[in-house]
Image: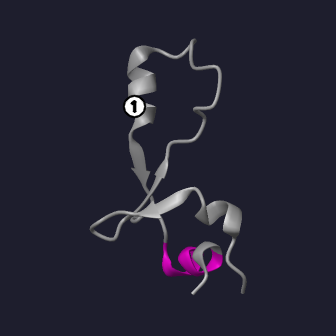
Amino acid sequence: MKTNKSFTKRLRVSKNGKIVARAPGQNHFNAKESSSGRMRRRRSISFHAAFDNTAKSRFLGN
């Protein structure tokens, strides 16, 4: 099965091997967000626990 290239470009592997990504929904309309909401989205989201082996193989390939 092919790797989903558009999805893999949004992810990176951390130093400890966790899969992390930027929080979605940050491109525009951020002026209406509270400052705490903007700060919360600035952090990366860990996908490591959310992905089971089938999802990893589906999106990330071999």
Q: Which residue is mark 1?
A: 40
Left or right for 39, reference 10: left
Q: Residue at x 48, y 53 (%)?
A: 21
Is residue 56 within the magenta segment? yes
Q: Secondary structure at mark 1?
A: helix
Q: Residue furthest left?
A: 16
Left or right for 45, reference 15: right
Other residues around mark 1 within 10 Å, as few (<14) / some (14–19) / many (≥20)? few
The kind of secondary structure the magenta stretch mainly shows is helix
Using the rendered view, name the quadrant where residue 61 is placed.
Answer: bottom right
Q: Nearer the viewer, residue 27 or 47?
A: 27
Using the rendered view, name the quadrant where residue 10 is placed.
Answer: bottom right
Q: How many marks?
A: 1
Q: Position of residue 26 (x, y in %)?
A: 57, 32
Q: Quadrant of the C terminus?
A: bottom right
Q: Residue at x 50, y 80 (%)?
A: 53
Q: Residue furthest right?
A: 2
Q: Residue at x 58, y 75 (%)?
A: 60
- Amino acid type, mark 1: Arg
Q: Residue at x 69, y 61 (%)?
A: 6
Is residue 14 shown above or below 25?
Answer: below
Q: Position of residue 33 (x, y in %)?
A: 52, 17
Q: Position of residue 17 (x, y in %)?
A: 33, 71
Q: Quadrant of the N terminus?
A: bottom right
Is residue 23 shown above or below 51?
Answer: above
Q: Nearer the viewer, residue 15 or 30?
A: 15
Is residue 20 shown above or below 31?
Answer: below
The magenta stretch is 52-58
Q: Position of residue 35 (x, y in %)?
A: 41, 16
Left or right for 37, reference 24: left
